Amino acid sequence: MRRFDGVDALTIALWAACGAFVLLPIAAILRLAGDGRQLAVLLQGDVLEAAGNSFVSATVSALLSVAVGTVFSLLLDRTDLPGRTALRLLALSPMLMPPFVGAIAWLGILGPTSPINLWWRERFGTPLWSLYGGDGVIMLLTVHSYPIAMLIVSAALRRIPSDLEQAARIGGAGPLRAVGAITLPLLRPALLSSFILVAVGNLADFGIPSIIGLPERYVTVATLVYRYLQSGTVDDPLAVVATIGVVLLVIAVLALVADALLGRRGWELDASAAVIERVPLGPARVPAAVVMWIVVLGITMLPLAALLVQTLLKAPGVPLVWENLTLDNLTRALTSQTALTGAANSVLLAGLAALICGVLGLGIGVVLARTRSRAARGLGAVATAPTAIPGIVIAVAWLVLAPSLGLFNTPWLILVAYVTSFTALVVQAVAAPLSATPAVAEEAARIAGAGRLRALIDISCRMALPAAVSGAVIVAVTAVRELTLSVLLLSPGSQTLGVAIFNFQQAGAFNTASAWSLIVAVFGIAFIGLATRRTP
């Protein structure tokens, strides 16, 4: 029987940390909602309406995201479309912009006072299309979700040998027929997986529905929960919100189980050494490239341009002429005490979250990749579980725990929620590359007399440190612009930058909100780009 050693002690300590940050809040929310006294609330009209809106927006946006992501993947990975590398980077960039920032940006393009709608109203008497409402929510959820589907489909597409398509082409099938008869059926598991992941994520999104949906009274579950917590329109709001959170948690778990079961039924393909033969687009090559560039630039660069215009205009809706341009909005934004306090709090909380998640994620990732025990596998499953839990559920869970832990009305409540939500980013960044690295160096250290823990720290931890640092940087950038957790856990003295921008937008200070959104978008994209480029 193997002796208890330092690695076992480390595993127990990591289990304790995961228990405190993951299992404890989940248990708290289950306990609060477990008596079933608030189940009747789920049948009330406003809850049913919000649930219906959430279901429609999440489902339709997931379907559209999968369709757009699949088309983009096929064009960029299977055809001779020119400029594929640059197009791929641009097409993935919407996932680097916070959804609520994207919502503010798109209001400058298709909002009621946008130049497009003002011009159209002058010509035809009515606006072309107002972004406010359910259709706008679905559109923006699609824009910010299709990169996830694109990544999943592209990864699956690279595993499909192109010689299968070539065989179909030799048999007389055209390019479209080969894709429809061979490629798409083999992509079915990836398509279903991306649909489930996108739908679960969009089901609980707060930023886009709050900014785009609420002005037209399009209420989703996320915005309804926010209203319950802020207005106290129901008795025992925490219990009501906990019950709603448990329902969302059950839906997320069932979706993940369905995804796992469907994944097991996927096709198993032998690896092929054949060079990928790209489908020649022929005469359509240049027109397809032009259309692709227009669409991708419209989705990615146009929102940034709109934020810049909104920042420079003296007021929303005024004509875009030189006389109406000013730097006053940027100056006002950078001197706003509310925003500066929020930015300082966000930097502090994001830095602490990055440090804690980096250390915790490094330890879990190394143990998961190198020990391969049941305890390690369970630890990895618990640590990465919050990636499938809606942010609303995590926020409500910590609200339930806050009074008993002394965290109520403190900024540390937001910090622990960040650690719960974002530790998985570092674990995934560490475990994946380390698992693919041979353990020869650790074995050599053990032969030289080092214990298991010493070999793990001296060899594996040092090897995984760059990945952990990159993961921690991504945590910091994600946390500093986060909204869903912060807006639900907000307390006096814990204003964050995301909440400050949201409040500017809700109060009608659109130019100030646009100025800070532009700053967040540019810095976020730059920092995440640097972090991911340095990842091994």
Image (spheres, rainbow, N blue to C red):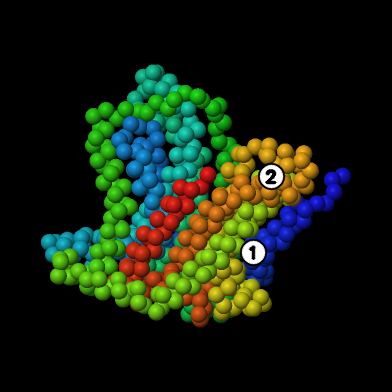
Query: In terms of image quadrants, where is residue 389?
Result: bottom right
Q: Quadrant of the N terminus?
A: top right
The answer to whether residue 516 is above or below residue 260 is below
Query: In terms of image quadrants, where is residue 329?
Result: bottom left
- Provide residue 109's location: percent of width, then percent of height: 26, 60
Amino acid marked by disc 2: Arg
The answer to whether residue 400 is above or below residue 422 is below
Give the residue drawn at x 52%, y 39%.
189
- Provide residue 149's location: percent of width, then percent of height: 45, 46
Residue nearer the viewer, 296 or 182: 296
The answer to whether residue 203 is above or below residue 66 is below
The residue labelled by disc 1 is: 21
Amino acid marked by disc 1: Phe
Q: Which mark is residue 370?
A: 2
Asked whether, in this view, residue 328 is left or right of residue 259, the answer is left
Mark earlier in primary sequence (1, 2): 1
Q: Are marks 1 and 2 in contact (CB under 8 Å)?
A: no
